[in-house]
Amino acid sequence: VQLQAFGGGLVQPGGSLRLSCAVSGIIFNIPYLGWHRQAPGKQRELVASVTSTGITNYADSVKGRFTVSRDNAKKTVYLQMNSLKPEDTAVYSCNADIRVRAGWPTRNYWGQGTQVTVSS
């Protein structure tokens, strides 16, 4: 099982970016998908998450600006980031609780990070 994130880059303040994270490998289900970020000199923080039933959760700092969604058929989670601010600059990583086989416990997996830089 692997997670691979795409979509980072350089954007001006007020701009938008869309991150994607695709899960590959043979799995049974993905109860939880999330995005975290870590800025230089700061602790990693949860940005947004979405469960298999569509329940979402956001950090206060991104509410109203970021939207997390998932495509279960594509085993992909998205993070639409609008009205970006310089303080959103960080390495963004996706993670997932994945059940490989029915009846097995879930295991947490992490993808590689993708750099998001918000600067003029």
Image (cartoon, grey):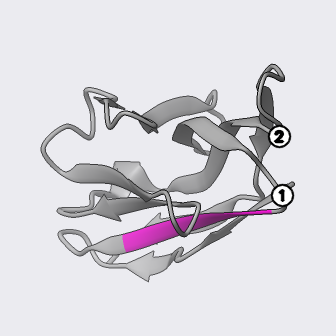
Q: Where 19 sits versus 69, above or below?
A: below
x%, y% of residue 23?
70, 60
Q: Does the magenta-highlighted stretch encompass residue 19?
A: yes
| Mark with earlier residue (2, 1) | 1
Q: Which residue is mark 1?
A: 26
Q: Which residue is mark 2?
A: 100
Amino acid type, mark 1 = Ile
Q: Residue at (23%, 75%) from the top-left corner?
A: 15
Magenta residues? Answer: 18-24
Q: Does the magenta-highlighted stretch encompass residue 85?
A: no
Query: Of helix, strand and loop, which one carries label 2?
Result: loop
Query: Of helix, strand and loop, which one carries label 1?
Result: loop
Badge 2 density bin: few <14, some 14–19, many ≥20, Cα 10 Å: some
Q: Residue at (77%, 45%) from the top-left corner?
A: 110
Q: Residue at (46%, 80%) from the top-left corner?
A: 10
- Residue 4 falls in image quadrant: bottom right
